[in-house]
């Protein structure tokens, strides 16, 4: 260890051996807590982020996380490293809490150089769970691939990091502190974000709905970051009855469940919404770091792909978008439901690879207003990240304007645009070798699939998706195998970039129908033959030994 002094601040330079595995995936560096607790592991990645940034002196950075296990320790380490690296000011969420969209908003508001978000999103927490570090740039959006690649190279060769020795700051108390020469401002985690929401939506109308005796809702914060946000906005500000928000306290292990808003993990909400009697009119949930959302009605589930399409079709009802919207974008595996709306409204519809970072350029260039992914992520140009509570308020605003039920709104949408049946089958914790062999086999044989018939339908297009970014002309290859049939049904295969244990194969299946008689089928039933085709084409059983997926959404 080397110690130097700068303006009365003792900076320690710690020698380390480079870590070769700090490659960020779909959304930041995500590893087990145990891995992050390895001596100097977190420090190496943070120093690599700092080294990748052009000018830290006098800069402002936003810092916060989803409250998961190791959040508080990580924040104190990052603060001491930021001071040692000459950062001018850190704006920190109280108790270390900030949702991903709140960080994105604060970056823009304070013209910060960027933000560090501590979260592994919807992955489990606790000492045996996962931890993660995401970096958002000055645009408020996730670091682009060029930057994450650079950070990875820096980390692979990093031999030292800088840190100061100093007592921890009291991060639970709002106020201004000095850490060495660096200013630290501990702010209310919710206030700025709540104001942004009030500027976008018609709070008066939403409040009238939420306080009406004829309406009830249930919001499941999954013991994760949106608890304080949802209680402050939905209950305190908009007047929803106390108890509308369930599991509203962020817990380091999320109460022992996955903070993943889907039909499998948001169990309590799903049971509430599927009650035979007295189910709430509206149900919603958000994930670990508050960027995902699930939307439900009384005995009804809205697929995220449909949700994006319906939000686009009804955007004119929301004050912030009432003047009209620019284009829209969806990730490649997301269903084409939004394409149909875009076509009718005469909007550009972009197809990007999986991962929010690919929307950032389009949002920055004002090419799109709304965007979303099948993985329960929706967002707009209000911040450069997906935003769970924003989507919930968007739906509440639609309900308040239409005075109609969730189910009826969705059914009317299908009647007008047709229905895109959609499902995703995940095969989790596969040995890397078998997942890669399966994928390589598909990739190698992709051209031979062309014109082949399966269950009376012929494959008219088959490729490994390459994205040409229309804004910066960057090219992202190998973004998933895409198989399209002559009735516009689609099967997509991808390997996940966010898992921490083994490989996850994702199979996305979609079928478009316009015949009203075809609207009432169970999704898995409607997609049965395509599901079988997918299993056959990829020889899932042969490569993995699995006869069924681990999770179906
Ligand atoms: C998953 C989702 C993707 C989302 C990402 C981060 O990534 O599929 O849409 O952007 O989490 O929330 P994957 O594990 O598929 O790489
Ligand atoms: Zn998330």
Image: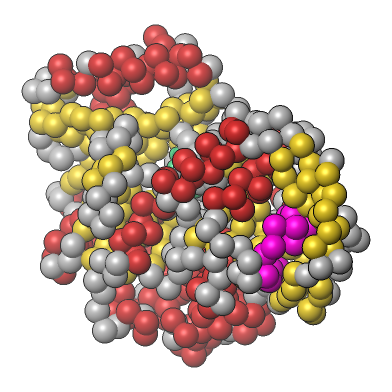
Q: Nearer the viewer, residue 440 or 548?
A: 440
Q: Position of residue 419 (x, y in %)?
A: 24, 51
Q: Residue at x 29, y 70 (%)?
A: 366
Q: Furthest-bottom residue in view?
A: 204
Q: Position of residue 58 (x, y in %)?
A: 63, 71
Q: Position of residue 376 (x, y in %)?
A: 45, 52
Verify whether residue 84 appears in magenta. yes
Q: Residue at x 49, y 28 (%)?
A: 504
Q: Is residue 445 visible?
A: yes
Taking 445 as reference, is 297 above or below it?
A: below
Q: Which residues are magenta?
A: 78-93
Q: Furthest-top residue in view?
A: 542
Q: Position of residue 447 (x, y in %)?
A: 16, 20
Is 392 left, or right, of 165 in this rendering?
A: left
Q: Nearer the viewer, residue 415 or 74?
A: 74
Q: Is residue 278 visible?
A: no
Total number of numbered discs in the rendering: 0
Is 119 left, or right, of 161 in this rendering?
A: left
Q: Residue at x 10, y 34 (%)?
A: 486
Q: Residue at x 38, y 75 (%)?
A: 398
**Quarter of the view holding residue 201:** bottom left
**Quarter of the view holding residue 449:** top left
Q: Nearer the viewer, residue 319 or 54?
A: 54
**Quarter of the view holding residue 461:** top left
Q: Dividing the image into 4 quarters, which one contains the C terminus?
A: top left
Taking 231 as reference, is 293 above or below it?
A: above
């Amino acid at each position: 260890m080397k110690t130097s002094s700068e303006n009365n601040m003792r900076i320690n330079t710690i020698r380390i051996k480079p870590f070769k595995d700090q490659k960020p995936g779909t959304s930041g560096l995500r590893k087990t807590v145990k891995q992050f607790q390895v001596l100097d592991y977190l420090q190496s990645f943070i120093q690599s982020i700092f080294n990748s940034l052009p000018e830290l002196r006098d800069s402002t950075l936003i810092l916060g996380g989803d409250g998961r296990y190791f959040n508080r320790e990580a924040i104190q380490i990052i603060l001491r490293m930021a001071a040692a690296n000459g950062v001018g000011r850190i704006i920190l969420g109280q108790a270390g809490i900030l949702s991903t969209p709140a960080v994105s908003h604060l970056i823009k508001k304070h013209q910060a150089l960027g933000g560090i978000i501590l979260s592994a999103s919807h992955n489990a927490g606790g000492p045996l769970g996962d931890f993660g570090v995401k970096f958002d740039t000055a645009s408020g959006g996730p670091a682009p691939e060029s930057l994450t690649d650079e950070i990875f190279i820096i980390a692979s060769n990093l031999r030292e990091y800088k840190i100061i020795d100093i007592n921890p700051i009291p991060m639970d108390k709002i106020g201004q502190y000095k850490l060495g020469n660096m200013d630290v401002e501990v702010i209310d985690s919710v206030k700025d974000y709540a104001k942004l929401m009030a500027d976008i939506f018609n709070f008066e109308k939403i409040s009238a709905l939420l306080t009406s005796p004829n309406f009830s809702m249930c919001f499941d914060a999954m013991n994760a970051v949106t608890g304080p946000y949802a209680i402050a906005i939905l209950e305190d500000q908009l007047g929803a009855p106390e108890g509308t928000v369930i599991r509203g306290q962020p817990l380091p292990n999320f109460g022992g469940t996955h903070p993943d808003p889907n039909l499998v993990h948001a169990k309590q909400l799903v049971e509430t919404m599927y009650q035979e009697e007295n189910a709430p009119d509206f149900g919603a949930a958000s994930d670990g770091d508050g960027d995902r959302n699930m939307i439900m009605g009384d005995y009804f589930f809205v697929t995220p792909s449909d949700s994006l399409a319906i939000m686009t079709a009804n955007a004119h009802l929301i004050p912030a978008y009432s003047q009209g919207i620019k284009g829209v974008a969806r990730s490649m595996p997301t269903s084409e439901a939004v394409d149909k709306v875009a076509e009718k409204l005469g909007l550009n519809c972009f197809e990007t690879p999986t991962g929010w970072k690919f929307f950032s350029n389009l949002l920055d260039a004002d090419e799109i207003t709304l965007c979303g992914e099948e993985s329960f992520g929706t967002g707009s140009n209000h911040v450069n990240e997906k935003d769970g509570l924003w989507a919930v308020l968007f739906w509440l605003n639609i309900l308040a304007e239409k005075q109609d039920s969730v189910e009826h709104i969705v059914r009317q949408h299908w009647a007008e645009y047709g229905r895109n049946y959609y499902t995703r089958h995940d095969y989790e914790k596969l040995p890397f070798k078998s997942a890669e062999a399966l994928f390589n086999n598909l990739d190698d044989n992709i051209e031979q699939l062309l014109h082949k018939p399966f269950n009376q339908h012929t494959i008219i297009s088959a490729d490994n998706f390459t994205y040409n970014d229309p804004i910066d002309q960057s090219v992202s290859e190998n973004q998933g195998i895409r198989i399209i049939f002559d009735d516009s049904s689609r099967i997509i295969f991808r390997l996940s970039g966010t898992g921490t244990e083994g490989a996850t194969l994702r199979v996305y299946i979609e079928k478009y129908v316009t015949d009203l008689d075809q609207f009432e089928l169970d999704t898995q039933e409607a997609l049965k033959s395509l599901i079988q085709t997918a299993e056959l084409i990829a020889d899932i059983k042969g490569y993995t030994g699995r006869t069924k997926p681990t999770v179906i959404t």
